[in-house]
Image (cartoon, grey):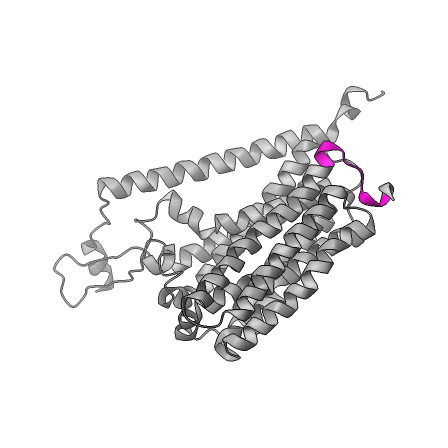
Amino acid sequence: MSDITYTQPDGGPNRASVSAPGYMEADIADYLALLKPRVMSLVVFTGLVGMVIAPGSIHPLTAITALLCIAIGAGASGALNMWWDADIDAVMDRTAKRPIPRGVVSAQSAAAFGGTLSAASIFVMMALVGYVPAALLAFTIIFYVLIYTMWLKRATSQNIVIGGLAGALPPAIGWASVTGTLAIEPLVLVAIIFFWTPPHFWALALVRNEDYARAGVPMLPVVAGPDATRTQILLYSLLLVPLAMSPVALGFGGILYAVSSVGLGAGFLWCAVQVYRHRTADMADSSAMRLFGFSIFYLFALFASLLIERIVGLAPFASWI
Amino acid sequence: MAGDNNTDIEPVRLTPEQQARLRRRNIVVALSLAALVGLFFAMTLVRLGGNVASRSY
């Protein structure tokens, strides 16, 4: 491997160095960091909700296997993303501490790690859970790595809008793990995450604008400016909030979900309006970070209410009226 | 000659800390593979279910 440095004992002209960082320094925690565990937790959670709301039954071990494959597949995508974007990560404050820029894991090792886990997660999903969830998982990984990471991220300000599809698909994978097919319900959950992604990431991009500009990543605030980004955040939020209420109308969201989606939606809109209004100095940054933080809570709480309804046996709201 | 040079190559020497990290990583890889084997075994039992126990001859 190119990780090892071969050195002539006399240090003379025959000195042959094929050094790359990593091989000897990386610990288990560094490889775990490549899997982006925080992103992974949200992905697994939304996949679990897709599984729980699906009709029919699934053996608990099959369910755990499916979630494991979703987790590993998502983590492997993260590792491949860190491999490809190591140059960007190195110049951004937010990502400079990642294992590759820090020099404890080589880019080649990250690529091998991510590639192996991607293939393994798809294969295990196919062999032990089903062809449809495996195909969806493969599509998710390929879309995230090839379409988002290798193409869109450096090419267009709509990178995270289109690329967000990869992060939105886990509820569909979870649903397909139970039913072996797709339906309107998981696709609505996919749409909710899809429309949630732009305001979530753009809120962070507003604060990290200089970081992205320095790295040459054409995020919307870099390309179109902060004010245009604030308008887009508000518009996407206005689409997201009613969309997030649609499970109630479609009959798979109960009273708890109805109350949650209204309350959380009001909070999300308030945060988005604050971002739109506060455009200068510290107020602008604090409003954007508040929206970023709340958006994570919003998605967790929204999906958690669906999960809780199924666990405690609350009937869908449609049957109440 | 290239062959003579190869005999002069000094092997990589790991520090005790590097050896410990390498060992930890190897153990995790081994445990992961063992877990995968166990998962396939358990899932085989799940998929076969009662079909084998109640099979008719």
- Direction from residue A15 to residue A137 in the image, left or right: right
**Furthest-bottom residue in view?**
A224
Residue A195: percent from left, percent from top: 66, 62
Is residue B50 in view from this perspective? yes
Q: Position of residue A227 (x, y in %)?
A: 53, 76
Q: Residue at x 60, y 45 (%)?
A: A44
Residue at position x 34%, y 38% from top? Answer: B23
The image quarter containing residue A228 is bottom right
Please say if A314 is above or below A262.
above
**In the picture, which quadrant includes the C terminus of chain A?**
top right
Q: Quadrant of the N terminus of chain A?
A: bottom left
* Residue B49 image offset from top left, x and y in percent: 74, 26
Q: Is residue A292 above or below residue A320?
A: below
Q: Is residue A101 above or below residue A216?
A: above
- Residue A299 lies, in percent from the top left, at 61, 51
Residue situated in front as seen by the camera: A39 or B15: A39
Identify the magenta region. A310-318
User: Is A165 contained in the magenta span?
Assistant: no
Q: Can the viewer see residue A142 in this picture?
A: no
Q: Residue at x 46, y 67 (%)?
A: A284
Query: Could you tell me which residue is drawn at 70 percent across and 43 percent down?
Result: A306
**What count of labels does the image hold?**
0
Q: Would you say A253 lies left or right of A101 here?
A: right
Front position in the image: A74 or A205: A205
Of residues A40 and A210, the one nearer the viewer is A210
Is A316 contained in the magenta span? yes
